[in-house]
Amino acid sequence: MTPPVEIAPAGGRVGVLLVGLGAVSTTTIAGTLAIRKGIASPIGSLTQMGTIRLGKRSEGRSPKIKELVPLASLDDLVFGGWDIFEEDCYAAARTAGVLEPSLLAEVRQELEAIRPMPAVFDQKYVRRLDGPNVKTGKNKRDLAEQLIADIRAFRQDQGCDRLVMVWCGSTEVYLRQGAAHASIAAFEHALERSDDTIPSSMIYAYAALREGIPYANAAPNLSADVPAMLELAARTKAPVAGKDLKTGQTLIKTIIAPGLKARLLGVEGWYSTNILGNRDGEVLDDPESFKTKEESKKSVLDYIFQPHLYPGLYDNLCHVVRINYYPPRGDNKEGWDNIDLVGWLGYPMQLKINFLCRDSILAAPIVLDTALFLDLSKRAGMSGIQEWLSFYFKSPMHAPEVYPEHDLFIQLMKLKNTLRYMKGEELITHLGREYYD
């Protein structure tokens, strides 16, 4: 079968620009460097370890994903980015305290060579952080132009053939779409007057999309999820994905909730609490930043359980989410869930989950996969929202006329079927009648 999508070759250097060179970014960079040196394994990365079934089960064809579609090689990746602190990536990684010093020592030279560019930052949107490595300008349009200059200089200096940008910065205060976000014309006018409804993350999204660079949002911020940014992405043929990396507690929810719904078990309550002590925890200690995260985390169950279709099972679900900043825990996050279930004849049951996880360890392979898949999307001419990457996000971007898909297993089917489609392979429906008819 002739593939319906023509994919440009993956050769050449790919610049991965990360906004915020903190725990997640430095863990991603150091991990990628260690993996390509052969001293670590890419556990958790679909692009590096995942396989994909092709054709019928009886055919036995299950190549690795990176053997099916032309993904950029880890050897071709070059990293850069922005941060409000001036320390290089080795120092930042030591500060984050995620990775063992012995592993960091193996890639120290490469990490020390990556120094952050001055960031676009306004404490109005992230109240618990401040730093000296910050750009100044006459207005937000000027700041956006400075970012574009940074992007072009990085491309030139590093000899990059292609670029991808991923926002790995902090959760900003809660914002709703407004008039400034309705169109590019309105947005650019709002940039000129430094409109308060344009946070820092949106300035980065604008700069990337103006340059036609794929953009992913790893936080729950509005960022590129507004009509103006989607209009710009269509104009420059740039793919976008987001929002908010699905790690920790929400990952568990999107694994457990589909199973409970599949068996039509009722859920009366789902109480979730988190403790974490890294910079993300400090930021989320601010109520306005927490509200942004809360909206992202709480929407998951509503869409999976579909209470409008199953009112007797989920209509009165009490869903509570708490995040507590606890400095001694560092990057080692703990998510605790209590789920009150209802079974046959209305009999009550409970499920309790205690997930002691490492936030940046779960996030790093997602950042890598998202960057590689967005680069693939760009080379395949797929612009705008990449809903097939919903697998990686808590609050997936989606077309306004449809609801977002949160079921992890449906998301994975969507992702793999998109890859099959790109290569002209038969889509897998799992009907299976052909083996018995």
Image (cartoon, rainbow, N blue to C red):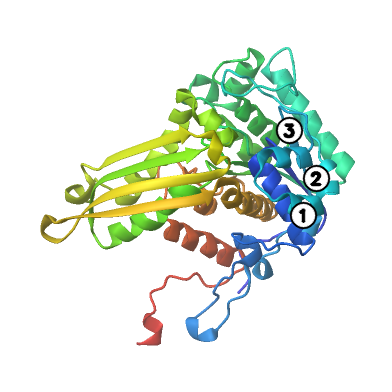
Report the residue marked by disc 2.
111
- Comparing marks 3 and 2, which lies closer to the viewer? 2
Residue 212 in view, yes or no: no
Report the residue marked by disc 3.
82
- Kindly identify the residue that appears in the image at 57 percent across and 23 percent down: 128
Three-letter code for the amino acid on which mark 1 is drawn: Leu
Judged left or right of residue 173, residue 136 is right
Report the residue marked by disc 1.
33
Mark with earlier residue (1, 3): 1
Q: Quadrant of the C terminus?
A: bottom left
Along the viewing direction, whichever of 257 and 407 lies nearer the viewer: 257
Along the viewing direction, whichever of 285 and 406 lies nearer the viewer: 285
Crowdedness near tag 1: few (<14), some (14–19) or many (≥20) residues, C-alpha within 10 Å: many
- Kindly identify the residue that appears in the image at 25 percent across and 54 percent down: 350
Mark 1 and mark 2 in contact? Answer it, CB < 8 Å.
yes
Three-letter code for the amino acid on which mark 2 is drawn: Leu
Mark 1 and mark 3 in contact? Answer it, CB < 8 Å.
no
Judged left or right of residue 6, residue 242 is left
Q: Is residue 81 above or below residue 178?
A: below
Secondary structure under tag 1 reads: helix
Mark with earlier residue (3, 2): 3
Q: Is residue 205 above or below residue 175?
A: below
Q: Quadrant of the N terminus?
A: bottom right
Image coordinates of residue 395 in percent, x first then y, are 46, 42
